[in-house]
Image: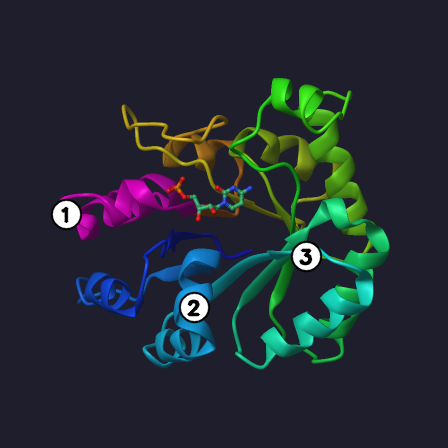
Amino acid sequence: MPKDVIIALDFPDRTHTLEFLDLFKEEKPYVKIGMELFYRAGPDMVREIKNRGHRIFLDLKLHDIPNTVASAMQSLSKLKVDMVNLHAGGGIRMMRDAADALHTLGPGRPLIIAVTVLTSLDQEVLANELLIGEMLSETVLRYAGNAKTAGLDGVVCSPHEAPAVHRTYGTDFLTVTPGIRPAGGDKGDQKRVATPEEARRLGSDYIVVGRPITRAADPVSIYRRCVHDFLGTS
Ligand code: C5P
């Protein structure tokens, strides 16, 4: 299974995004386009970045009734992105209908993964605000099981949850892990964090790194260090 570092392009507009991508002269990083950029710059931004040769994880975290999410997935698949996602909290039927909509596209289809529990949430918020009494780790595992049952390719989770997900659902079931902070970095709003090196040891398939790279004085060198620490190469 290919492993890689995905840069979260959490920029407010097209200009900032392209300025950032232009810094990369020698490599074409795998990038993630989330709500912030997509709602501002739209599908054209996705096409433009794709045309520049980047692989794209379109992180729109869909969550609605099954029919709406399945139709939305069909629309997104027209953008030829490499990975899409939805919230496991939408239930197995929603995930299955979405996955089925993509499976009809055949081998070149985007990977589809489920967000389990956001890495910005912790046990206390889960219990007191979401009213989920189970342990957070158990909730992640059960949601991952629902995603597997629904025919998805993997889940978004914290690197710390990757070993249990792989043990339970197999190493082919992808773990895409945000909440990455280089050693000594600021945690910001993330709670369940790991360094790229820890994520590698924990078996993450893809790490998603945003602000530690995008807000760095020298983003390219931080990206390269993440690649080195995560993949063990330069
Ligand atoms: O800046 P930072 O490295 O925290 O960015 C993490 C990225 O991963 C953000 O774009 C965030 O939306 C995304 N993400 C996350 N937790 C999830 C799913 C996606 O942090 N469970």
User: Which mark is drawn over residue 153?
Assistant: 3
In the image, what residue occupies the spot 51% across and 63% down? 58
* Cα separation between marks 1 and 2: 22 Å
Q: Position of residue 171 (x, y in %)?
A: 65, 45
* Cα separation between marks 3 and 2: 17 Å
Residue placed under numbered mark 2 in the picture = 55
Q: Secondary structure at mark 2?
A: loop
Is 45 included in the stretch rendered in magenta? no
In the rendered structure, which amino acid carries the disc numbered 3? Asp
In the rendered structure, which amino acid carries the disc numbered 1? Asp
Q: Secondary structure at mark 3?
A: loop
Q: Earlier in the sequence, mark 3 or mark 1?
A: 3
Q: Position of residue 159 (x, y in %)?
A: 52, 34
Residue placed under numbered mark 1 in the picture = 218
Which quadrant would residue 17 be assigned to in this image? bottom left
Is 209 included in the stretch rendered in magenta? yes
Which is in the foreground here, disc 3 or disc 1?
Answer: 1
Asked if one can make out residue 77 in the rendered structure from this viewpoint, the answer is yes
Q: Earlier in the sequence, mark 3 or mark 2?
A: 2
In the rendered structure, which amino acid carries the disc numbered 2? Arg
Q: Which residues are magenta?
A: 208-234
Check contact, mark 3 vs mark 1: CB within 8 A. Answer: no
Q: Secondary structure at mark 1?
A: loop
Q: Earlier in the sequence, mark 1 or mark 2?
A: 2
Q: Quadrant of the N terminus?
A: bottom right
215 or 197, which is in the foreground?
A: 215
In the image, what residue occupies the spot 63% across and 20% down? 123
Ligand 1 near label 3 (Cβ, under 8 Å)?
Answer: no
Left or right placement of residue 181 versus residue 201 in this view: left
Q: Main secondary structure of the magenta part?
A: helix
